[in-house]
Amino acid sequence: MAAAALGAAVIVLRTPKLRRLAVQLARQYAGGPLAAWAATSVRDAWNQSAQTSGGVNIPRATADRSEAMPLTAAKPAR
């Protein structure tokens, strides 16, 4: 299995068209699912650190999305 993966990697790296495709797919993955996974992991770690703070009650900052302020466009100053 490892030999097949290594052989495929060599073919992809030696063929310019396949190399460009691989780089494009890697960029899309890094910008989409990988970024979402990282954000979820950070949020979960933050929430767990609040629950297991060693018995000390430390208030944590939270974002309450139910009372979010609406975005309004500011007029430029003249």
Image (cartoon, rainbow, N blue to C red):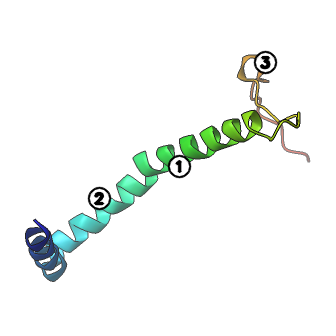
Give the mark, 3 or 2, whose residue is nearer the N terminus. Answer: 2
**Quarter assignment of residue 70:** top right
Residue situated in front as seen by the camera: 24 or 45:
45
Q: Amino acid at mark 2?
A: Leu
Q: Secondary structure at mark 2?
A: helix
Look at the picture and state if 73 lies above or below 27. above
- Whole-number angstrom distance, CA of label 3 to CA of label 2: 38 Å
- The Cα atoms of the two marked residues, 3 and 1, are separated by 26 Å
Residue placed most toward the observer, 9 or 26 = 9
Residue at x 17% of width, y 74% of height? 9
Depth-wise, is mark 1 or mark 2 nearer the camera? 1
Q: Which residue is mark 2?
A: 25
* Relative to 71, residue 24 above or below: below
Q: Earlier in the sequence, mark 3 or mark 1?
A: 1
Q: Which residue corresponds to mark 3? A: 67
Give residue 1's quadrant in the image: bottom left
Q: Nearer the viewer, residue 73 or 14?
A: 14
The residue shown at (88%, 37%) is 56
- The residue carrying mark 1 is 38
